[in-house]
Amino acid sequence: MAVAPGANMQGVKVLLWLGELFTGAKSFKANPIIGSERLNRYGLHAARVWSAYWMSRLRMAMLASGVPKADRAQFQRFGYVLKENYLSDQQFQALIREIGAYEGEIRECCQGDTNTHRVLLAPEVVEQLPTVKAVLEDSALKRLFRYCAGHARLPICHIENVHNGSRDSVTERDPQKNLHVDTFQPTMKFWLYLEDVTDENGPFVFVPGSNWPHRERLKWEYQMSLRAREHADRYTARGSFRVSQEEAERLGEGGPRPFRVKANTLLIANTFGVHARGNAEPGSSRLALWGMSRTNPFLPLPGLGFDYLNRLQYRVLQRMRRQEDAKAAAKGGQSSWHVIEQRRL
């Protein structure tokens, strides 16, 4: 008996959806298995959260050598590492001058009333920025990055400038300024702030202790998973759960903390923890070296961290951005991260 083509395609889709259970796929909307209320009632989502966390801890243990004990303890308990006066004054001033003088491709993302500008620190760009290169190639920093990420591959790095209140948006507040978690798995992000961070330009807000699946967190994840697929908030439906103030108080120690810090402060955070971009005055901006690292959450080993793979991830991202540009242009629009005419941050 012949099988209808549609049935074959549906079978392929089901296999793909099943396969995504063992990856970082997080969308309750795009994957009906991840979003299944019945399966999540039996604990599917909670099991993914718990498993991803402990796999991450296993990989981190393998990467702990050479990382100060105090940094490891702070990151495990609170979900962040904070280092003030990170660079020498001489190196920091050289970094400021170098970034201020750099001209190159800038991409922009518009969310609510916020424009975020980023320069991708691809290998060919870093070669033009010797101070940036020296900072990012510091062996102690690379060990810390790898430990906090739970993976030997280094983060993808950018120079980032967040412009607050630079757009008129009557339809949506900047979604990054609502308390949220990025995904169900541990994820490392870092900021090396190049200017003071105050209430004026929007400090990073984080809930210390919300970075691991303790009993209250797992209970909340379970409850959210039952209604996420049909949730009115599209980010929640895609797997980046939004968090109320009351929930934030329960999910960590002491509620949301704004990180008002001086220039030359390094902050590394696990954005599985509850966090947000702080409210800011319109017209203000915040400049930093910024990076992110996320891997398949269910890998038992941290990988090899070959330089070739670190460089390759930039090529992959650049190709993906160009494809998104072409797809958006074909529809007469712009990609979410589009190139702008401006060449200096």
Image (spheres, rainbow, N blue to C red):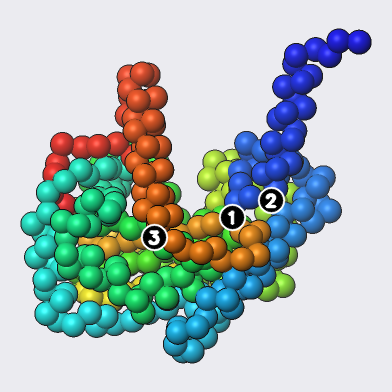
Q: Residues within 10 Å of mark 2 (few under 14, many from 20)?
A: some
Answer above or below: position of 5 versus 317: above
Label for residue 22?
A: 2
Amino acid bearing label 2:
Phe
Q: Give the mark nearest the N terminus, 1 or 2.
A: 2
Q: Position of residue 52 (x, y in %)?
A: 65, 62
Q: Are marks 1 and 2 in contact (CB under 8 Å)?
A: yes
Amino acid bearing label 3:
Asp
Quadrant housing residue 140: bottom left
Q: Position of residue 26 (x, y in %)?
A: 61, 48
The answer to whether residue 11 shows anywhere in this view is yes
Q: Residues within 10 Å of mark 3 (few under 14, many from 20)?
A: few
Point out the residue furthest to the right here. 1
> Can you tell which of label 1 and label 3 is closer to the viewer?
3
Point out the residue furthest to the top here. 2
Quadrant housing residue 170: top left
Q: Give the mark nearest the N terminus, 2 or 3.
A: 2
Dot 1: what SS? loop
Amino acid bearing label 1:
Asn
The answer to whether residue 220 shows anywhere in this view is no
| Side of 268 relative to 44 (left or right) | left
Q: Give the mark nearest the N terminus, 1 or 3.
A: 1
| Side of 249 relative to 165 (left or right) | right
Per the image, the residue denoted by label 1 is: 296
Per the image, the residue denoted by label 3 is: 307
